[in-house]
């Protein structure tokens, strides 16, 4: 299988991390999103939405949306809880990541890291800070109660939230005031087969 993505993107990195943790063989195809490589005719045939990450299976079928890909790769693994309610909680956190976390932390990081903080987007960047800290506060509260977001075991919820949380400082979010999150980051980084975001470029 092939994974099309940009390893500096948290959404793409989630896929690389999932594959690494589960030792899933795949080919990484680097895509330069800043050079409009997701808007080519060839790429749009694979994903009409023109975004990465994108998973292409051996038979040519394609799957987009980062958490859908994470969950597909993690099927039948320990990253998907067996208990129905726990599985639903992993989905709850993944929806939280896309609607309450990523729009603030990832966008602020994109403005600062990818675009170099253009003056035209500085007000938008500053406006993202309260929402990002709210999301981090919700995570912090849960991680004070359990070592992982859904109980005592690493799950797809953790992988999905780890993607942008561990580089939140690049979007202006100081994690020093979130000790439970910092401990959680360290636990994930200690996992066998863990890879850093810069790997695989």
Image: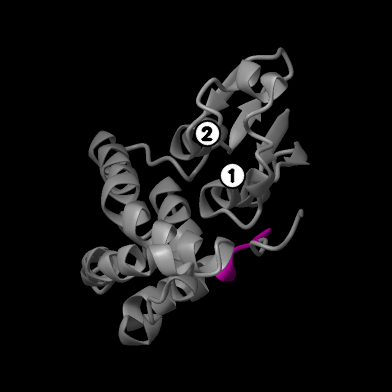
> Would you name the residue on which mark 2 appears?
69
Q: Position of residue 40 (x, y in %)?
A: 68, 26
Between 69 and 21, the one lying in front of the other is: 69
Residue drawn at point x = 53 percent, y = 54 percent:
10
Q: Colour mode? A: one colour
Between 49 and 118, the one lying in front of the other is: 118
The part of the image, by quadrant, that contains residue 51 is top right
Most extreme residue toward the bottom is 176
Q: What element carries label 1?
A: helix
Q: In this view, does 166 lie to the left or right of 179?
A: right
Q: Which quadrant of the figure contains the N terminus? A: top right
Q: Callout 1 environment at 10 Å: few (<14), some (14 to 19), or many (20+)?
A: many
The part of the image, by quadrant, that contains residue 197 is bottom right
Q: Do the residues labelled 2 and 1 touch (CB within 8 Å)?
A: yes
Q: How far apart are marks 2 and 1 (CA)?
A: 7 Å
Queried whether the magenta region covers residue 24, the answer comes back as no
Vertical relation: 153 (above or below) 19? below
Q: What element carries label 2?
A: helix
Q: Position of residue 88 (x, y in %)?
A: 26, 37
Q: Could you tell me what secondary structure mostly forms the magenta stretch?
A: loop
Vertical relation: 12 (above or below) 132? above
Between 80 and 106, the one lying in front of the other is: 106
Residue drawn at point x = 68 percent, y = 19 percent:
41
Q: Which quadrant of the figure contains the C terminus? A: bottom right
Label 2 or label 1, whichever comes before in sequence order: 1
Q: Position of residue 188 (x, y in %)?
A: 52, 66
Q: Position of residue 46 (x, y in %)?
A: 63, 19
> Would you name the residue on which mark 1 appears?
15
Query: Which segment did they paint magenta?
Result: 189-194
């Amino acid at each position: 299988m092939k994974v099309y993505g940009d390893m500096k993107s948290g959404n793409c990195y989630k896929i690389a991390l999932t594959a690494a943790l589960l030792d899933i063989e795949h080919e990484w195809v680097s895509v330069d999103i800043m050079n409009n490589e997701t808007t080519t005719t060839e790429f749009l045939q694979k994903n009409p939405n023109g975004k990465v990450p994108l998973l292409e299976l051996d038979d040519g079928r394609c799957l987009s949306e980062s958490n859908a890909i994470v969950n597909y790769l993690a099927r039948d693994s320990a990253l998907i809880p067996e208990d129905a309610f726990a599985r639903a909680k992993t989905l709850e956190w993944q929806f939280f990541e896309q609607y309450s976390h990523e729009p603030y932390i990832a966008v602020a990081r994109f403005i600062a890291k990818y675009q170099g903080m253009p003056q035209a987007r500085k007000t938008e960047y500053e406006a993202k800070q309260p929402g990002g800290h709210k999301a981090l506060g919700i995570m912090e509260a849960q991680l004070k109660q359990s070592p992982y977001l859904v109980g005592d075991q690493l799950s797809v919820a953790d992988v999905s939230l780890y993607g942008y949380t561990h580089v939140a400082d690049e979007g202006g979010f100081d994690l020093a005031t979130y000790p439970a999150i910092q401990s959680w980051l360290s636990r994930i980084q200690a996992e066998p087969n863990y890879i850093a975001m810069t790997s695989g470029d």
